[in-house]
Amino acid sequence: MPALRLATRLLTVLAALALSVPAANADPGTLTVVAADGTSHSFAAAALLARPDVETLRAPDDPAYGAASPAYRAIPLAKVMAGLPVAGADVLKAVALDGFVAQLPAGKALNADPAGAVAYLAIEDPDRPWPKLPGKDVSAGPFYVVWAHPKRSGIGPEAWPYQTARLELTSSVASRYPEILVDPALAADHPARRGQEVFVDNCFVCHRMNGGGEASIGPDLNLPMNPTEYFQAAALRTYIRDPKAVRDWDGQAMPGFGPGTIGDADLDALIGYLGHMTGRR
């Protein structure tokens, strides 16, 4: 029955929420890394800063600080993960203290070839703390995934998780969250399939779909209703581009996604995906 199915979905959301956010009493100066074989490893900020392979990195594309981006003490993620089992992982999942969850393609996150984008783990030195984030009372630390040359691999701003508490090598998003998938009967070139990819890269970090996912910053985008059901088409496009142009309030967290992040064709595909999912509850 629809009511029972909806109730089951909502219970799934609540259960997943309880598991997804790092424990409030966890040591913020220690990063937890879960390898592809499920083993858990702890990395203390002080120990990482003392390593000989730590570098000073400038990140001109830093979406958190913009032009105020500090010089980071950072280690390539590939070196942080060196010696840990990584084979078979499709995704490096980064879970932040505020409930943001980035699903980073493992091949890109662990790339060490400077011909492509290279991910780094930036570590905040408590003796030289980073500035507070714009409009916030906290910095991006103690751990922040930053990128050198992100445009070389098409890395967008949602792939820069700050206040990262946990990194986990895991299987694909599709295998873990079938709730977010389009109808398998859709043609391979159907725009909603591309929209699903855009959703995972840009929206899934804060939102869930049909209870699927782990992020807890924003609401589920299909339960109990879908944005295409309560926004007019033009208003929804405007809201995605510039949320404050549609509605504004203290504590609003959603950023705008300009054409440089989500092109017009991809925005059409994303909205098409959202509309398609109204029939996939």
Image (cartoon, rainbow, N blue to C red):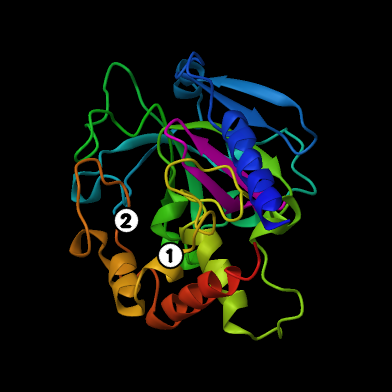
Q: Is residue 84 magenta?
A: no
| Front residue of 237 and 256 | 237
Can you identify the residue that label 2 sits on?
Answer: 61
- Residue at left 53%, top 26%? 22
Can you identify the residue that label 1 sits on?
Answer: 227
- Residue 252 image point, x, y percent: 26, 46
| Front residue of 27 and 106 | 27
Per the rendered image, the range of residues in magenta is 90-106
Name the secondary structure under disc 1. helix
Tell me: 147 left or right of 245.
right
* Dominant secondary structure (helix, strand or loop) of the stretch shown in magenta: strand
Of the residues shown, which amino acid type is indicated by label 1? Answer: Pro
Q: Is residue 278 visible?
A: yes
Of the residues shown, which amino acid type is indicated by label 2? Answer: Asp
Image depth: mark 2 or mark 1 in front:
1
Pointer 2 or 1: first along the chain: 2
Q: Is residue 87 above or below residue 152?
A: above
Name the secondary structure under disc 2. loop
- Residue 219 image point, x, y percent: 45, 48
- Residue 61 image point, x, y percent: 32, 56
Q: Is residue 106 above or below residue 13?
A: below
Q: Is residue 115 visible?
A: no
- Residue 248 image point, x, y percent: 19, 53
Callout 1 environment at 10 Å: few (<14), some (14 to 19), or many (20+)? some
Callout 2 environment at 10 Å: few (<14), some (14 to 19), or many (20+)? some
- Residue at left 22%, top 32%? 132
